[in-house]
Image (spheres, rainbow, N blue to C red):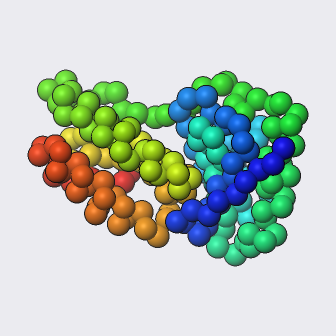
Amino acid sequence: MFIQTERTPNPATLKFLPGEAVMSSGTADFRDVESAERSPLARRLFQIEGVTGVFFGGDFVSVSKSDDADWQMLKPVILGVIMEHFVAGHPLLLDDAAQTAEAEADDGADAEIIAQIKELLDTRVRPAVAQDGGDITYQGFQNGIVMLQLQGSCQGCPSSTMTLKMGIENMLKHYIPEVVEVRAV
């Protein structure tokens, strides 16, 4: 098995591509060891000193590190853990359910606007941020404000505010006049 690595816009996150599907659908974001209990691979990655986050996308695993950790030391260990996991055929998630947390309790009056927001996110935003090792998920819409959650390499990325405000917010405002602001939650 050959695992490729790619840099992301976030210097604290690397994207690992095992050359096969990681998540069959959805994504899974683990921000600490407690949240990783449902994933044997995420649990093992968190056992590596310096690992602070793990994110699973369709065909990649993003791993985030602490500021004082060095990729030169971490990368070979992470590659070994990922390779061992996939070669052994272990399950990615114990409950085999994706953690795509989307707010479903939105106001019915805004249903059409919400559908447009989700469509733009799914077709224009999420594929682009997935290339960078992350994801952005819809969390709600209220009083013209779209709430989004940054995951994977997007979380804590130095350019995430610029992407959110100049990219996503401007695009949503352009196509959907009811949108007045985009916020990360």
Does residue 53 lie above or below 141 as drawn? Answer: below
For the residue pair 122 and 156, the one nearer the viewer reads as: 122
Q: Would residue 153 appear left or right of 120 to someone viewing this image?
A: right
User: Which residue occupies 86% across, 37% down?
Assistant: 87
Residue 81 locus on image (x, y percent): 83, 49
Tell me if residue 148 comes above or below residue 119 in the rendering.
below
Extreme residue toward the left, this view? 177
Can residue 183 be seen from the camera position used here?
no
Question: Is the residue 128 above or below the residue 101 in the image?
Answer: below
Give coordinates of residue 53: x percent, y percent. 64, 54
Q: Residue at x 79, y 55 (%)?
A: 78
Q: How far across and down, in percent of the image, does residue 138 sit? A: 36, 40
Residue 25 visible within the image: yes
Residue 166 as seen in the image, left or right of residue 6:
left
State the image quarter where residue 114 is shown: top left
Q: Tell me the residue at 23%/48% (across/down).
A: 172
Side (left or right) of 57 relative to 110: right
Residue drawn 72% across and 42% down? 19
